[in-house]
Image (spheres, rainbow, N blue to C red):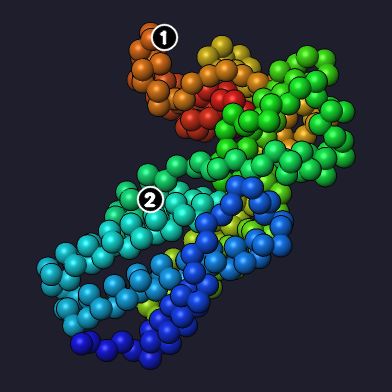
Amino acid sequence: MRKFGARTSLFLLTTTGFAAALGYRPVSSTETLESPSNFLNGVVRSSRALSTITSCVVDYKYSLHSLPADSEEYGRTLSEIHLRSARRILRLCDVNKGFYVKAGQFVAAMRQVPQEYSTTLSSLQDQAVPCNFEAIKKAVLKSLGKDLSEIFLSFDEQPVAAASIAQVHHALLKDGQEVAVKVQYPGLEYQMQYDFATMTFLSRLVAWIFPDYRFEWMVSEFEKSIASELDFIQEAKNSERTAISFKKNSMVRIPCIYWDFTSSQVLTMQFCEGQKVDDLEFFKQMGIKPVEVCFFGSKSPGGSLRRDDIYSRIRSW
């Protein structure tokens, strides 16, 4: 049996023991991220990540050991390891959800990573089990300083969409205006700190074990990206800038922002019906040629248009 170096052995003993001691506990949709039990949940999430990366490290170290780096077998084996490791990370993201899903999508979009990773992780869907309604009510009260009944004529308890950082509810303002209310999950910043600490730790460990590892910068870049996504004030401003850019274009409808009921954690926008831009059946029914949508996106300001922009940030999501 091949032997691992001292660095790898220390890493494996630490991480596998840590993960085995903590076990495997899924996230509960009935708990808020701020509840005391989620401290343990945060630790368990980290243990899953540690265990997954340990498996990847073992695979790379063991499978490539003694293979000449310039040989055909080395290249073929490396590709196979990339694929196995990408699938492990995909499972980790699916189970841990939240920022791990966002991280997986971020990696999938990077051209610098091996193709096996980008192809495998591109299947990640930004969906989540909705947070319980009581937690959402408290989040709105804390963020806007008013109870739901003081702002809305009605507020649907069942969200129309739920993703990794927020969920969207259909509601009616006191004047009868139909709106979409995007509410950030309570305690998300705490979870973000925990998850990013884990990701940073793992990235540095991998760099320590594999001196040729050159992706440490990705964690800090992802952190910057997600921090801006958590700021709903900035998102609202971006939406208004988009509206100004397309005010003379009848193909695009941008929901207006209701600033009196918007904060960094709650975003209230005009509710707009729509379909996803990849719904080809809808295009067929409406007599829309997909190529025209692609052409429209390529001619938008900046040369490209995000899917959400084409359909007016469908359901304000």
* One can see residue 137 in this view: yes
Residue occupying the point 29% across, 72% down: 59
Residue occupying the point 18% across, 83% down: 66
Q: Position of residue 314 (x, y in %)?
A: 56, 25
Q: Nearer the viewer, residue 250 or 190?
A: 190
Q: Position of residue 192 (x, y in %)?
A: 63, 58
Q: Viewed as shown, does residue 123 lie left or right of 182? A: left
* One can see residue 110 in this view: no
Q: Badge 1: how crowded within 10 Å, few (<14), some, or many (20+)? A: few
Q: Give the total of numbered labels.
A: 2
Q: Nearer the viewer, residue 88 or 18?
A: 18
Q: CA distance from mark 2 to mark 1?
A: 32 Å
Q: Which residue is mark 1?
A: 286
Q: Position of residue 170 (x, y in %)?
A: 67, 25
Kind of residue sitting beneath label 1: Met
Residue occupying the point 79% across, 43% down: 138
Q: Viewed as shown, does residue 67 lie left or right of 199? A: left
Mark sitting on residue 121: 2
